[in-house]
Image (cartoon, rainbow, N blue to C red):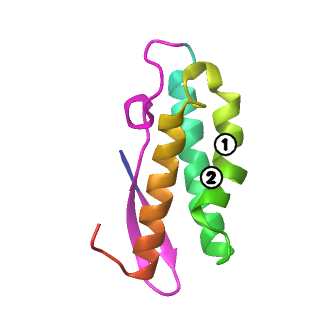
């Protein structure tokens, strides 16, 4: 896991834990490019969070489809297009939305 600090207008700086390695993303172990896939997914998740801040109407599901899924497709042979990495991205984006709203009950 990696801690990402994101500054918001309404909540100040939020510290958000995000997946960052092969295990966190539940990618295939021992497959060439798996670490690169994990890094690319982490970068895509970060971009999705920042896009959601910039465009308040962008929902978590749309951010996954538009920003994370293209990366999943690119790294399909490393397991990125399986359901686990996609659900992982959805989970962390929804958690991020709850943090933005001030719902710290997660």
Residue 50 location in percent, x, y? 60, 65
Q: Which mark is residue 69?
A: 1
Q: Left or right of 73: which side holds 100?
A: left
Q: Are marks 2 and 1 in contact (CB under 8 Å)?
A: yes
Against 57, residue 80 (above or below) is above
Q: Position of residue 74 (x, y in %)?
A: 70, 30
- Give the extent of the magenta segment: 4-31
User: x and y percent of residue 71 in the render?
Assistant: 67, 38
Task: Provide the residue designation for mark 2.
Answer: 64
Using the image, determine if residue 11 lies above or below residue 39.
below
- Camera-nearest residue between 74 and 46: 74
Mark 2 or mark 1: whose residue is earlier in sequence: 2
**Image quadrant of residue 76?**
top right
| Relative horizontal placement of residue 57, taking residue 34 as reference (left or right) | right
Q: Secondary structure at mark 2?
A: helix
Name the residue rendered at 62%, 52% in the picture: 64
Q: Quadrant of the N terminus?
A: top left
Mark 2 surroundings within 10 Å by alpha-carbon count, few (fewer than 14), some (14 through 19), many (20 or more) = many
For image coordinates 47% across by 20% down, the residue present is 28
Q: Residue at x 41, y 63 (%)?
A: 95
Helix, strand or loop at mark 1: helix
Residue farthest to the left?
A: 105
- Residue 5 in view: no
- Location of the C terminus by quadrant is bottom left
């Amino acid at each position: 896991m990696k801690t990402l600090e994101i500054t918001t207008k309404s909540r100040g700086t939020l510290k958000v834990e995000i997946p960052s390695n092969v295990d966190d993303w539940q990618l295939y172990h021992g497959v060439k490019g798996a670490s690169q896939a994990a890094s690319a997914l982490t970068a895509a998740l970060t971009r999705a969070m920042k896009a959601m801040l910039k465009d308040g109407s962008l929902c978590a599901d749309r951010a996954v489809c538009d920003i994370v899924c293209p990366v999943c497709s690119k790294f399909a042979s490393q397991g990125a297009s399986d359901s686990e990495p996609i659900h992982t991205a959805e989970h962390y984006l929804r958690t991020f939305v709850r943090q933005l709203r001030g719902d710290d009950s997660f």
